[in-house]
C-alpha cells in the first residue's frame, strides 16, 4: 500500500513512492508515459500527489482510468521544487547512497521525491527514522508486464473468482516470513532482464535446492523470525510496544544460526546475503537485559522492565512489594487483635484499601477504625497504619509505572537509532527466504533449472503449466514441447477445438519464461530461455464489462496496445482474437493482426496465437516465420477424446458439435446442429467468402451473399424463371412485361 507522487519536467515523468509502514522508498522516471503507466499497474497506490499542472494531462487521465479508487491531491508547484533537494535528501538518506544516483539528470524523479518527502512530513504524525534508503530503479531493468498480462496469466489471483488459491504466486510462495513473502511478490511482479542477475538468482536457488538438509534447517530457523522490517519501522517511528522489542530480540537470536547455515555457500548472492545479516548482539542484549519476557501490550502500566536493570526502579518495586506484604499481613494481625474471625482486608479502585467487618460484628470494631463505606451486610473501615502503607504502595506503584515508561522509551530510542542495521538484516532475510522458497518449490514440483541466454531462442522440452498441473491429479497433465525464435519459428498458430488445451499451452509458455526471468526453476524437463523484454497477452473474455466497455471493445483496445508497444524482443500471447464479433469480422481482424505482427519490421515478436479459426493456418503458406501446431484429438465414433498433445501442423476441423455433446447439450440440438453444418458445407465456402489458398473448397461467391444464402435450400423462383426462358423467343413487349412482373416479385 503505497503513497506516491508524480512530477513532470521537460516531458519526463518522475515517480516516487513510499510504504509508510516499512519506510521502503523507491524512485524512478520515464520519458514514455505508457512505460510508466505499465509500471504503475502492478503497484497498489492508496494516495497520490501531483502538481496542479498535471490535473488535465492525458497521463493523469490514463492513470485515473487505471486506478479509479486511488485518492489524488493536486498540490502547488513549490512542493515539487528541486531547490534545496540536496539538503532535504541529506536529512533522510546517507551520502554514499545518494552518490549512486545521478540527480542532475533525473530532475523529474528528484522533484517527485522532494514532493513526497515534504508532503509526508507535513501530514504524518509519526517519526521518519525508518525512511533512510532511496532506491532508484531504472525501468528497463525489468521485464515489463502490464496489468492485463498480470491478470491473464493469473499471477496473483484467478481471473474468474479473484482468489489467491489457483494463482501462480500461490504455487511459488513457500516463504515462511512476511518479509520473504513480500520480496517474492516483488520478484514475480518485476522479473529481470539482465541474464547475469537472473543467473545469480538461479545459482543461489540451485545451491539451496541441492543442500537438502540445510534447507530444512533454514526454513525452520527463518520461521522463527518475525517481521523485523515492520518491527524496525515501528521502533523508529516510536510506536513499538514492549512485545515488539521482544519479538525483535527473539528474531535477532535466530540470525547467528541462519548465518551459520549459509556460511559455506559458494553462490555470490548468498554470500552477499551472509554479509548483510547482522545479529546485532548489542541490541539483542540491551532488550534481553531490560525487557520482561512476556510484557503486556500497554507501555504505561508497568511490568515491562526486568528487575536488576535500573536501581531506581528496583527501589520503587521493593517499596511497593514491602508495602503490599505489610498489608497482606494486616488481616491476620487484626483478626487476632479484635477477635473478629470474618475480618477481611481488600482493595477497590475507588476507595483504595479497606478493612471489612460484617454488620453482626460491628460492635467489636476498635475505636481507631474510621468508617469509609457502608454496604448492605458489612462496613468498611480504614486505620492510620493502613492509610500510611496505602499511600506508600500507591505512590511507589505510580512512580514505578512512570519510571518504566521512561526507561522503555529510552531503550526504544536507542534501538531506533540502529534502524539501518535492522533494515539491512531484514532485507537479507527477505532475499534468503524468497530464494529458499523457490528452491523448495522447485524440488517439490520437480522443476528444472532453465538455461538463460540473450538470444532469441525459447526451447522448452516437456513443459507444464505450473498451476494447472497442480490442480490435476498426479500424472494427468500432459507435458508439451515448444520451440520459438525470431526467425522461422516466430509466429506459432495453435489450432484445435475448444477445450483442447490451447489457452493452457500458450499461457504455460509465458509463465515458464516469466518464472525463468524471476530466477525460478521452471516446470519442464529442460528449458532454454532467450530473455524477453515484455510479455503481452490478449486472452479470453475480460471482466471489464463492469467498467462499461463491451467485450469486443476491450479486446480491440488490448490488441491496439500490443501492436503499439511490443518490440522484437517481446513475447505475445493471442488467444481467440476476434471472437467478440461476427465470424467474418473476427477472422478478418485476426488475419490482419497476425500479418502485421509477423511482417512489421519493428515488431516480428515471438508470438503464440491460439485460435479455433482453422483458416488462419493458411498464413504459413506465405509467411516464413509462421508455423502451425495443433492440439491432438482422437475421434472415437461420434465422440472425440482430447489428447492434450501439441503436434506439428494445423487442423481443419473444429469439432464444435462433438464438444457440445461432451458438454451435455441435448441430443436433439446436437443432431440439428449437424444438419445446419451440412448445409453450410454445401455452400462450399470458406468463412471469409474468398477462395481458399489450397486444400479447402473453392467458392466464388461474395461473403455477404454467402451469409444470406447459407440456409437457402431452394432456388429463388425469379432466378429459376430467368434461367428457363429464351429472350429471342419473346417480343419486346412480352420481355418488358416479364421484367415488370419480376420486379414486383423481387420487391415482395
Ligand atoms: P482451449 O483453450 O483449447 O479451449 P483450455 O486451455 O482452456 O482449452 O483447456 C481446457 C481444459 O483442459 C482445462 O480445464 C485444462 O485443465 C485441461 N488441460 C489443458 N492442457 C492440458 C494438459 N496439457 N494436460 C492435461 N490437461 C490439460
Image (tube, rainbow, N blue to C red):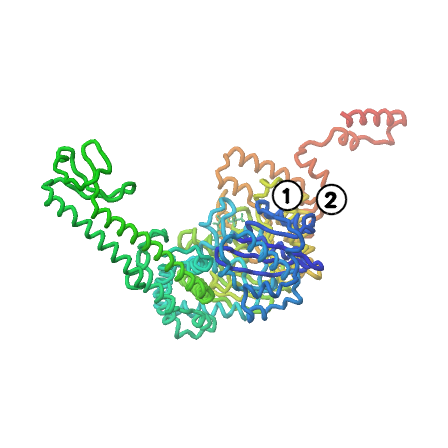
**Left or right of 704, for residue 100:** left
The local crowd at label 2, few if under 14, some if 14 to 19, many if 20 or more residues have their Cα within 10 Å, is few
**Left or right of 108, for residue 164:** left
Name the spot of residue 732 as percent of width and height, x first: 90, 27
Which residue is the extreme one toward the right?
732
From the viewer's perspective, is residue 188 above or below residue 60? below
Q: Nearer the viewer, mark 2 or mark 1?
A: 1
x 65%, y 61%: residue: 82
The local crowd at label 1, few if under 14, some if 14 to 19, many if 20 or more residues have their Cα within 10 Å, is some
Which numbered dot is residue 149? none
* Nearer to the camera, 37 or 361: 361
Q: Is residue 264 visible?
A: yes
Mark 1 CB within 8 Å of ligand 1: no
From the viewer's perspective, is residue 99 above or below residue 239? below
Tag 1, which secondary structure? helix
Which numbered dot is residue 552? 1
Name the spot of residue 509 as percent of width and height, x first: 54, 58
**Which quarter of the picture shows residue 413?**
bottom left
Q: CA distance from mark 2 to mark 1?
A: 30 Å
Tag 2, which secondary structure? loop
Asked if the residues shown at circle 2 and circle 1 are in contact, with their CB atoms under 8 angstroms apart, the answer is no
Name the spot of residue 429 as percent of width and height, x first: 43, 64
Which numbered dot is residue 700? 2
Mark positioned earlier in the residue sequence (2 or 1): 1
Q: Is residue 630 visible?
A: no
Q: Quadrant of the C terminus?
A: top right
Name the spot of residue 615 as percent of width and height, x first: 64, 49
**Which quarter of the picture shows residue 100?**
bottom right
**Left or right of 287, for residue 557:** right
Amino acid at each position: 500500500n503505497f503513497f506516491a507522487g508524480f512530477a513532470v519536467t521537460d516531458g519526463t515523468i518522475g515517480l516516487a513512492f513510499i510504504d509508510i509502514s516499512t519506510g521502503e522508498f523507491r524512485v524512478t522516471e520515464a520519458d514514455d508515459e505508457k512505460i510508466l503507466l505499465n509500471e504503475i499497474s502492478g503497484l497498489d497506490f492508496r494516495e497520490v500527489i501531483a502538481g496542479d499542472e498535471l490535473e488535465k494531462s492525458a497521463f493523469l487521465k490514463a492513470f485515473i482510468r487505471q486506478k479509479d479508487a486511488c485518492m489524488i491531491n493536486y498540490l502547488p508547484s513549490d512542493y515539487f521544487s528541486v531547490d534545496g533537494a540536496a539538503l532535504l535528501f541529506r536529512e533522510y538518506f546517507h551520502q554514499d547512497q545518494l552518490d549512486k544516483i545521478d540527480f542532475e539528470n533525473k530532475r523529474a524523479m528528484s522533484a517527485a521525491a522532494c514532493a513526497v518527502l515534504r508532503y509526508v512530513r507535513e501530514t504524518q504524525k509519526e517519526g521518519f527514522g525508518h525512511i533512510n534508503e532511496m532506491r532508484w530503479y531504472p525501468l528497463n531493468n525489468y521485464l515489463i508486464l502490464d496489468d492485463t498480462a498480470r491478470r491473464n496469466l493469473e499471477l496473483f489471483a484467478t481471473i474468474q473468482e479473484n482468489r489467491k488459491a489457483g494463482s501462480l504466486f500461490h504455487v511459488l510462495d513457500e516463504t515462511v516470513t512476511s518479509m520473504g513473502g513480500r520480496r517474492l511478490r516483488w520478484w514475480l511482479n518485476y522479473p529481470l532482464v539482465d541474464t547475469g542477475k537472473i543467473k545469480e538468482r538461479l545459482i543461489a536457488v540451485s545451491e539451496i535446492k541441492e543442500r537438502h538438509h540445510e534447507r530444512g534447517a533454514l526454513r525452520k530457523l527463518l520461521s522463527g523470525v518475525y517481521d523485523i522490517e515492520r518491527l524496525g519501522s515501528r521502533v523508529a517511528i516510536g510506536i513499538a510496544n514492549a512485545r515488539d522489542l521482544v519479538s525483535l530480540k527473539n528474531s535477532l537470536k535466530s540470525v547467528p544460526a541462519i548465518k551459520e547455515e549459509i556460511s559455506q555457500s559458494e553462490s555470490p548472492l548468498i554470500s552477499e546475503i551472509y554479509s548483510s545479516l547482522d545479529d546485532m548482539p548489542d541490541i539483542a542484549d540491551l532488550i534481553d537485559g531490560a525487557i520482561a519476557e512476556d510484557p503486556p501490550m500497554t507501555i504505561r502500566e508497568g511490568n515491562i522492565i526486568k528487575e536488576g536493570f535500573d536501581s531506581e526502579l528496583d527501589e520503587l518495586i521493593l517499596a511497593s512489594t514491602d508495602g503490599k506484604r505489610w498489608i497482606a499481613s494486616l488481616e491476620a494481625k487484626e483478626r487476632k487483635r479484635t477477635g473478629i474471625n470474618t475480618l477481611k482486608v481488600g482493595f477497590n479502585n475507588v476507595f483504595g484499601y479497606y478493612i471489612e467487618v460484617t454488620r453482626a460484628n460491628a460492635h467489636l470494631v476498635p475505636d481507631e477504625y474510621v468508617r469509609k463505606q457502608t454496604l448492605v451486610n458489612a462496613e468498611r473501615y480504614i486505620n492510620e497504619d493502613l492509610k500510611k502503607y496505602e499511600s506508600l504502595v500507591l505512590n511507589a506503584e505510580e512512580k514505578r509505572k512512570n519510571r518504566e515508561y521512561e526507561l522503555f522509551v529510552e531503550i526504544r530510542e536507542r534501538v531506533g537509532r540502529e534502524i539501518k542495521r535492522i533494515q539491512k538484516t531484514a532485507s537479507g532475510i527477505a532475499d534468503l527466504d524468497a530464494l529458499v522458497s523457490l528452491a523448495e518449490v522447485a524440488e517439490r514440483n520437480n522443476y528444472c533449472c532453465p538455461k538463460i541466454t540473450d538470444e532469441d531462442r525459447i526451447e522448452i522440452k516437456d513443459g507444464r503449466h505450473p498451476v494447472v498441473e497442480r490442480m490435476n491429479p498426479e500424472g494427468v497433465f500432459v507435458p508439451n514441447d515448444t520451440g520459438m525464435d525470431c526467425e522461422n519459428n516466430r509466429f506459432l498458430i495453435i489450432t484445435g477445438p475448444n477445450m483442447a488445451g490451447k489457452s493452457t499451452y500458450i499461457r504455460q509458455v509465458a509463465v515458464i519464461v516469466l518464472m525463468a526471468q524471476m530466477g525460478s526453476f521452471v516446470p519442464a524437463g529442460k528449458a532454454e530461455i532467450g530473455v524477453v523484454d515484455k510479455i503481452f497477452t490478449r486472452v479470453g473474455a475480460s471482466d471489464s464489462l463492469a467498467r462499461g466497455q463491451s467485450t469486443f471493445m476491450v479486446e480491440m483496445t488490448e490488441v491496439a496496445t500490443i501492436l503499439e508497444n511490443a518490440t522484437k524482443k517481446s513475447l505475445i500471447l493471442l488467444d481467440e482474437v476476434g471472437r467478440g464479433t461476427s465470424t467474418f469480422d473476427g477472422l478478418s481482424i485476426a488475419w490482419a493482426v497476425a500479418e502485421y505482427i509477423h511482417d512489421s519490421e519493428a515488431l516480428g515478436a515471438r508470438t503464440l496465437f491460439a485460435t479455433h479459426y482453422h483458416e488462419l493456418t493458411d498464413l504459413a503458406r506465405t509467411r516464413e516465420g509462421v508455423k502451425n501446431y495443433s492440439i491432438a484429438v482422437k475421434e472415437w465414433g461420434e465422440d472425440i477424446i482430447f489428447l492434450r498433445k501439441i503436434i506439428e501442423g494445423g487442423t481443419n476441423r473444429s469439432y464444435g458439435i462433438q464438444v457440445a455433446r461432451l458438454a451435455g447439450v441435448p441430443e436433439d440440438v446436437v443432431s440439428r446442429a449437424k444438419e445446419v453444418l451440412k448445409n453450410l458445407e454445401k455452400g462450399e465456402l470458406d468463412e471469409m467468402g474468398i477462395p481458399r489458398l489450397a486444400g479447402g473448397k473453392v467458392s466464388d461467391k461474395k461473403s455477404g451473399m454467402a451469409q444470406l444464402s447459407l440456409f437457402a435450400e431452394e432456388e429463388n423462383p425469379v432466378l429459376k424463371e430467368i434461367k428457363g426462358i429464351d429472350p429471342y423467343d419473346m417480343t419486346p413487349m412480352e420481355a418488358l412485361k416479364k421484367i415488370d412482373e419480376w420486379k414486383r416479385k423481387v420487391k415482395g
